[in-house]
Image: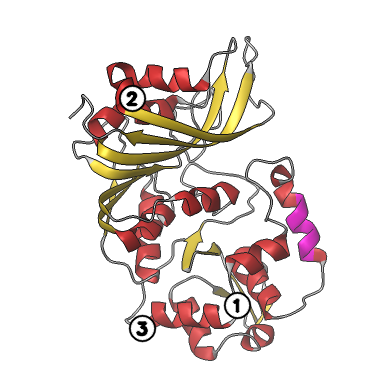
């Protein structure tokens, strides 16, 4: 099942109604206890925290909408009508965001999040089994990368592994041309739907595996939240989390290609799990990936030490998780 684009005016009505009901990231994250830093021990207990929330009494309309639109709980139609209008309910049903169960309850097969004034639909926040087409929900790291996106004007922006399209859509407010790329057809469908839902039509979303088909364009701003979980099964990038044996199979390709993809003076930001062995230095590792162009870039690493989740014969000396920023120096040796 996927969401469906609706008639003119339906997206505007839904956004206005959700804003009127205070369905905001602040309220959602506060109610669910999701205000902690990304990749903390508490964040790994997300499902347990949400289970506790589900058991709590409904306090107001925000709680009703969180249960309906974020947590996929069936809600009686009389409760929903206390919060949002019949017109908004009909719009949500028409777009397949919510569906009727029997005749008196509604539920959603997706999760909706508010991010910096945008409304983003993804696959469910809490699932029992992940399949390879699953579209990543908006979790802590997404808000972190979103808040770090430079606000200065960019002529051309690239969002790699776009998923729900959140970074492409957010950057479109201060970019000329925006391109979002993903190798998952379901992700491309969601990203196009979310662009429409937020009234933004200036983004090109493209189904492409840049590991197999290299990019030929250059960009002023590159954003990426690639798969980074160490996985030995299936090829890297086969789903939203598989980053290869050491978790960096995809991020290393991105960094190695920055000399070809990033313009002089351009910026690239990557969510990155950095696993190092034998006490190697993080910056040295990244500069090795850049090869002969290493001196063309300044590198800023904002990360926290986390417990290693990799199981290999050689134990990592350290594991960090955070955002890496590459700035290409104007007038460098590259093109």
Question: In this rendering, does residue 245 appear at all?
Answer: no
The picture places residue 198, in percent across and down from the top left corner, at: 39, 70
The picture places residue 283, in percent across and down from the top left corner, at: 47, 22
Quadrant for the C terminus in the image = top left
- Identify the residue under disc 2: 256
Mark 1 closeness class: few <14, some 14–19, many ≥20 residues within 10 Å? some
Left or right of 250 in this view: 143 = right
Mark 3 closeness class: few <14, some 14–19, many ≥20 residues within 10 Å? few
**Residue placed at 36% from the left, 54% from the top?**
168
Q: Report helix, strand or loop for mark 1.
A: loop
Q: Report helix, strand or loop for mark 2.
A: helix
Q: Is residue 256 magenta?
A: no
**Residue placed at 52% from the left, 27% from the top?**
247
How many marks the image carries: the answer is: 3
- Identify the residue under disc 1: 22
The segment highlighted magenta reads 48-54
Return the disc, 3 or 2, that comes first in the chain's sequence.
3
Q: Which mark is residue 9?
A: 3
Q: Which mark is residue 280?
A: none
Q: Are the residues tagged 3 and 2 within 8 Å (C-beta)? A: no
Left or right of 219 in this view: 275 = right
Residue 14's place in the image compared with 121, above or below, is below
Q: Is residue 50 magenta?
A: yes
């Amino acid at each position: 099942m996927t969401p469906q684009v609706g008639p003119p005016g339906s997206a505007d009505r839904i956004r206005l109604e959700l804003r009127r009901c205070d369905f905001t990231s602040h309220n959602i994250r506060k109610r669910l206890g999701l205000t902690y830093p990304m990749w903390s021990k508490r964040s790994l207990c997300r499902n347990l925290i949400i289970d506790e929330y589900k058991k709590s009494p409904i306090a107001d309309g925000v709680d009703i909408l969180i249960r309906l639109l974020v947590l996929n709980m069936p809600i009686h139609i009389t409760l929903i009508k206390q919060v949002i209008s019949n017109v908004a309910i009909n719009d949500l049903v028409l777009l397949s965001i919510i569906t009727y169960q029997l005749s008196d309850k509604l539920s959603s097969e997706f999760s909706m999040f508010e991010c910096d004034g945008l409304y983003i639909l993804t696959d469910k926040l809490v699932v029992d089994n992940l399949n390879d087409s699953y579209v990543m929900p908006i979790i802590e790291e997404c808000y972190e990368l979103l808040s770090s996106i430079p606000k200065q004007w960019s002529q051309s922006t690239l969002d790699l592994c776009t998923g729900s399209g959140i970074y492409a859509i957010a950057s479109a407010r201060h970019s000329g041309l925006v391109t979002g790329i993903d190798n998952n057809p379901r992700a491309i469908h969601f990203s196009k739907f979310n662009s429409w839902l937020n009234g933004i039509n200036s983004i090109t979303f493209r189904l492409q595996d840049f590991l197999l088909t290299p990019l030929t364009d250059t960009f002023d701003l590159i954003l990426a939240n690639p798969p980074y979980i160490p996985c030995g099964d299936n090829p890297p990038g086969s789903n939203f989390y598989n980053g290869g044996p050491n978790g960096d199979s995809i991020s290393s390709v991105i960094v190695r290609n920055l000399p070809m993809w990033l313009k002089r003076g351009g910026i690239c930001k990557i969510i990155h799990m950095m696993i190092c062995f034998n006490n190697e230095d993080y910056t040295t590792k990244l500069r090795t990936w850049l090869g002969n162009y290493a001196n063309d870039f300044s590198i800023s690493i904002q990360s926290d030490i986390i417990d290693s989740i990799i199981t290999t014969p050689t134990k990592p000396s350290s594991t960090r998780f955070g955002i890496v920023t590459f700035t290409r120096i104007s007038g460098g040796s590259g093109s």
